[in-house]
Image: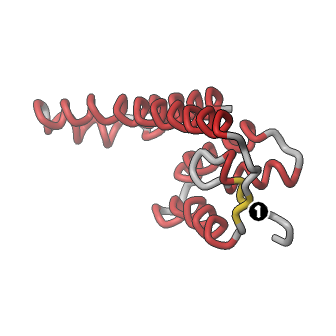
Amino acid sequence: MKNYYRMTDEALIAGVVAGIAEKTGLNRVGLRIAFFLVFVLINFIPGTGMGISILPLLIYTVAWMALPAREQGLSQAEIKKKIETRKTFYNYAMLGVTGNLIPLIAMGFFYPDQLLLLLFTVPVFLLLLPATVFIILGIVKAG
């Protein structure tokens, strides 16, 4: 990973994907969406079990620790704009997670027997769909 770095000024989380996109010349938004989809869809590989679902997170964390940070030396106005961009991403992500959890918590509170039936009969992909859509929207909006 020689000459790779994290772009902390362009980070939504730690700047790993932004740095890789910058170094390889790939579209940053597309690479972020691809990484997120791998993170979500890896759980649906038959016969792999739950252990593999942490693999993308582990890879990202190791890259976060291993790659040196690089700043672009932005002005105060540009830094404020980047902070607003991150807030947009976090707001969309939280909206998606909340959109997933509130109905499940409400159903578990009022109809606990129905919740178990729902969790065992509805494909997990459908249960994760609202959060997935909102997080991808947040990535696109954040640029």
Q: Quadrant of the N terminus?
A: bottom right
Front in this rendered view, residue 68 or 31: 68
Front in this rendered view, residue 90 or 82: 82
Residue 97 visible at all: yes
- Give left or right: position of 99 versus 13: left
In the picture shown, does residue 130 fall above or below 5? above
Residue under the image location 38 percent in, 35 percent down: 122
- Give left or right: position of 12 versus 116: right
User: Callout 1 environment at 10 Å: few (<14), some (14 to 19), or many (20+)?
Assistant: many
Percent position of residue 89, x then y? 54, 35
Residue under the image location 65 percent in, 29 percent down: 140
Percent position of residue 45, x then y? 58, 53
Front in this rendered view, residue 121 or 84: 84
Q: Name the residue under label 1.
A: 5
Front in this rendered view, residue 51 or 36: 36
Tell me the kind of residue under disc 1. Tyr
Q: Quadrant of the C terminus?
A: top right
Element at label 1: loop
Percent position of residue 133, x then y? 53, 29
In the picture shown, does residue 23 fall above or below 98? below
Percent position of residue 127, x then y? 40, 35
Residue under the image location 62 percent in, 43 percent down: 37
| Residue most extreme to the right | 25
Q: In which quarter of the image is residue 137?
A: top right
Q: How is the image coloured?
A: secondary structure
- Give left or right: position of 94 versus 29: left
